[in-house]
Amino acid sequence: MITYVTRKNIDIIKYDACIQNSINSRVYALSYYLDIVADNWDALILDNYKAVMPLPWRSKYFIKYIYPPCWTQQLGVFSTNKLDISLIDNFIKAIPKKFLKTTIQFHSNNYSDLFLKKDNYILDLNHSYEELHKNYRKDRKDRLKKFNKSECTLEKNISAKKITTLFKENYTNELNINLQDYRRLEQLATTKKLTPITLGVFDKERQLISGSLFFKDANRIYYVFSANNKKGNKVQGNTAVLNHIIQTYANTNYTLDFEGSMHPGIASFFKSFGSKMEAYYLLTKLPIDSFLSSLKK
């Protein structure tokens, strides 16, 4: 039986255990992560936490709706057992009708005929660096050589706030990220449970020109956020950062999750590292959808 449980009544130990032990675990669904990024969240629970589905929600003008919080690319249904379409559909049907709109991005192991496919790119790191590097596209290898000839340096443990500041100074007008979401990202970056990785590229004047933030769990390294200025783009700062991650974690069981993208240019950049496409899914549902579906039966 699938039950709707509010955040305060969720058994967090059992809930997080279900997420962490699931065959499709994602860091975004863990309780401490959602506590930071979501305005509110509750969950649908199957039996005694055999499967769970987090429901981030917010309210506007007294209207409640389910939404994908910033910094959560993939949520959905999580289970230690293999999921079938009928169970996914049952979870969707169990979403309370008090939510007048539902927008959820489901992870790659969920599927339903109701979903719209989206593209993500991943790279399995269980190979030697030499083999991984061999699979870089020629232009990516050339750009890495360009960085190595520059006078720039790559450094670890950069302040996440410095990276978000660099982003705001160069991209604020291009992406709709509000100040609260920047603060939430900075808070995530100080959460030790996430094992954040911050890398920065500095020019010879010691100015930060490129920076990236990754989160790491037991299975995945998530490429959550990056920023460059014009000089950082010119010297291929992002190429150097991603190459460093690949080189550092080569010959491990980690998967590098690029977190996107449907944008052709960004997708091409990710593919140039030898990554492969892994679909995830979008559900957008209005109350009228359920009404029309019932008329067809």
Image (cartoon, grey):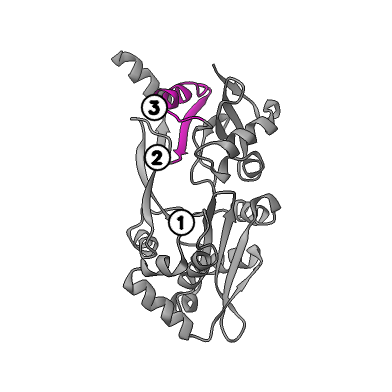
- Image point (60%, 39%), residue name: 20
Report, in whole angstroms, how far the alpha carbon at label 2 lies from the one at label 1: 16 Å
Which residue lies under the disc numbered 2?
Answer: 281
- Image point (58%, 37%), residue name: 21
Q: Nearer the viewer, residue 172 or 94?
A: 94
Horizontal relation, residue 293 to residue 58: left or right: left
Mark 2 or mark 3: which comes first in sequence? 3
Horizontal relation, residue 290 to residue 215: left or right: left
Q: Amino acid at mark 2?
A: Tyr
Near mark 3 (Cα within 10 A), the count class, few <14, some 14-19 or many ≥20, is few
Q: In this orientation, does residue 152 appear?
A: yes
Near mark 1 (Cα within 10 A), the count class, few <14, some 14-19 or many ≥20, is many
Residue 249: horizontal and vertical position, in percent? 54, 62
Q: Which residues are magenta?
A: 81-107
Q: Which mark is residue 271?
A: none
Mark 2 or mark 1: which comes first in sequence? 1
Q: Is residue 280 above or below residue 261?
A: above
Q: Count how many numbered circles sit on residues in the image.
A: 3
Q: Amino acid at mark 1?
A: Phe
Which residue lies under the disc numbered 1?
Answer: 258
Q: Secondary structure at mark 2?
A: strand
Report, in whole angstroms, how far the alpha carbon at label 1 lies from the one at label 3: 26 Å
Q: Secondary structure at mark 3?
A: helix
